[in-house]
Amino acid sequence: MEPDKIKDSIKRAAQELFRKFGYHKTSVNEIAKRAKIAKATIYKYFDSKEDVLHALLMDYIRVSVDELIHITTPETDEETHLNNLIMKTCRLSYTICNEFIGWEFIRESANSQAFLKNLSNELEELLISSFSQLSGLRRQDHYLQKLRFLIKCSKSIVFSFAFTSVSDADVRKNFVSFQKEVLPYLVKAAITI
């Protein structure tokens, strides 16, 4: 089997298991069994289970950011445009935490804060670099500064939900609160930059 196909097989198996059982409850042995390969083969392509998760997430993020960039319709109102863009980005972060990583990993793992910080930094850079490649007025440096400000503020708030919420319902409630009570002020601040 070709190396790319083996790697894809490992990621597909891990994704299915992470979604079904969560990151913590999935072992490398189970991933190997689902992918129909030897456990040692996984370590030929990935240093750890966390690296498999990271590769999965980056694949998902790249596709999602590409969709986000190309589906985003330029509203006439910059405030509405930025608000919608940040909410779509926040929903992406929520999906990553909810479907791939699992709230238990986020709350209970010693590595989770560093892992999420690294992941959110990569998401930020991917978003900014993707937007900087777009043509048109929104590509201007001034717009990218506003976007970077909003992403930095929002990601800090959104990822903090993972560490302060007790249940999925709390997380959803925090998102609604963020959207209604915090984001409008962040957008207004970004527009004045």
Image: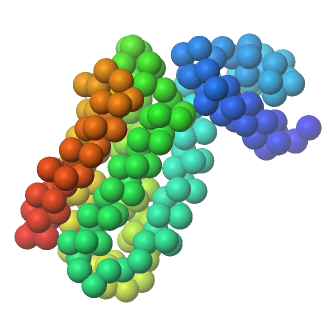
* Residue 142 quadrant: bottom left
Q: From what the image shows, is residue 107 above or below residue 185?
A: above
Q: Residue at x 28, y 54 (%)?
A: 151
Q: Nearer the viewer, residue 96 or 7?
A: 96
Q: Position of residue 136 (x, y in %)?
A: 37, 86
**In the image, 58: left or right of 87?**
right
Q: Nearer the viewer, residue 46 or 189?
A: 189
Q: Nearer the viewer, residue 9 or 42?
A: 9
Q: Position of residue 98 (x, y in %)?
A: 47, 34
Residue 190 visible to an observer of this rendering: yes
Q: Residue at x 31, y 58 (%)?
A: 86
**In the image, 181: left or right of 104?**
left
Q: Looking at the rendering, in which quadrant would you find the C terminus?
A: bottom left
Q: Residue at x 27, y 67 (%)?
A: 82
Q: Looking at the rendering, in which quadrant would you find the N terminus?
A: top right
Q: Residue at x 81, y 19 (%)?
A: 33
Query: Residue placed farthest to the right in the image?
Result: 1
**In the image, 23: left or right of 91?**
right
Residue 49 visible to an observer of this rendering: no
Q: From what the image shows, is residue 144 above or below residue 160?
A: below
Colouring chosen for the image of the structure: rainbow
The total number of labels drawn is 0
**In the image, 128: left or right of 145?**
right
Q: Position of residue 15 (x, y in %)?
A: 66, 33
* Residue 23 quadrant: top right
Q: Position of residue 109 (x, y in %)?
A: 41, 15
* Residue 133 quadrant: bottom left
